Amino acid sequence: MRYFFLIFFLMFFGCSFKKPVGYSTYLITIKSKNMRFSDIGYIKRYDNGSLEMEVYSAGTALIKLKVDGKVCSEEGCLSKESFNKKYFSREYPPELFKRVLLGKPIFDSKNLIKKGDGFEQTIYKKNSFDIIYKVNNELIYFKDRFNKILIKVKKIE
C-alpha cells in the first residue's frame, strides 16, 4: 500500500513541477519612482511563456517577480496594467516589462533599427514617454527620459 501512494504521487505530481527552459545570470538594474535596485540576479524563462526574475544582494533575495498573466511578487499580484501604473508609466503597453526582460522589440517594433547582433528603438510620445531601447547579445538597455526610468540587464559570463 505504501508503494501505491508513492507511485500515485510520482505519476501525477512528478512531472508537474515547472522547470525553466532558459536560465541566465545578469547584473539587473531597475530605477523608477517606486523601484530601485542594482545587483546580480537570474531571469528564468518557462516553456508556458511565463518568466521569473530574482535579484539577490549578499545572498539574500531583494526581489522576486513572476510575470505570467499577472505580475506577482511577495507583496501579491497585480495586473500588468496596474504594475506598469505603479512602477513605471500607465502609458506603457501591458507586455512592455516582460518584453524588455526578454530583449524583444516593444511597441509593435515601432522605429526598429537592426544593428549587428541586436537592434535599437527610439520611441517618443509627447508628455508620456521618451524611450531609448537597445538590445544586443550582452546588454538590454531601456531608458525613458521623460519618466526617469532605467532598466539595464547585463549578461554575466
Image: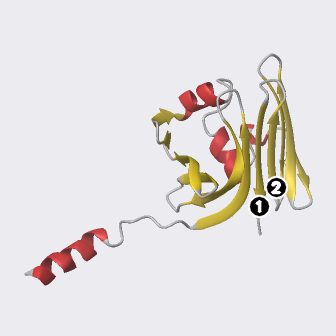
Q: Is residue 110 above or below residue 6?
A: above
**What x and y, as percent, mark residue 71?**
52, 40
x 65%, y 34%: residue: 35
**What x and y, as percent, mark residue 48?**
49, 58
Please give left or right for residue 107 compared with residue 64 in the image.
right
Please give left or right for residue 26 compared with residue 85 in the image.
right
59, 21: nearer the viewer: 59
Q: Which mark is residue 28?
A: none
Q: Quadrant of the C terminus?
A: bottom right
Q: Is residue 121 above or below residue 24?
A: above
62, 64: nearer the viewer: 62
Does the residue at mark 2 contact the one at mark 1 (Cβ under 8 Å)?
Answer: yes
Query: Local crowd at mark 1 within 10 Å, few (<14), some, or many (≥20)?
Result: some
SS category of the residue bearing label 2: strand
Q: In terms of sequence position, does the residue under pointer 2 or pointer 1 come before the other? A: 2
**What x and y, as percent, mark residue 9?**
23, 72
Is residue 5 visible from the viewing direction of this image? yes
Identify the coloring: secondary structure
Q: Which residue corresponds to mark 2?
A: 139
**What x and y, as percent, mark residue 32?**
71, 31
Q: Quadrant of residue 87 in the image?
A: top right
x 63%, y 45%: residue: 98
Figure label count:
2
SS category of the residue bearing label 1: strand
Under mark 1, the amino acid is Lys
Query: Local crowd at mark 2 within 10 Å, few (<14), some, or many (≥20)?
Result: some
Under mark 2, the amino acid is Leu
x 54%, y 55%: residue: 49
Which residue lies most toward the right here? 116
2, 78: nearer the viewer: 2
Q: Is residue 119 above or below residue 148?
A: below
Q: Which residue corresponds to mark 1?
A: 155
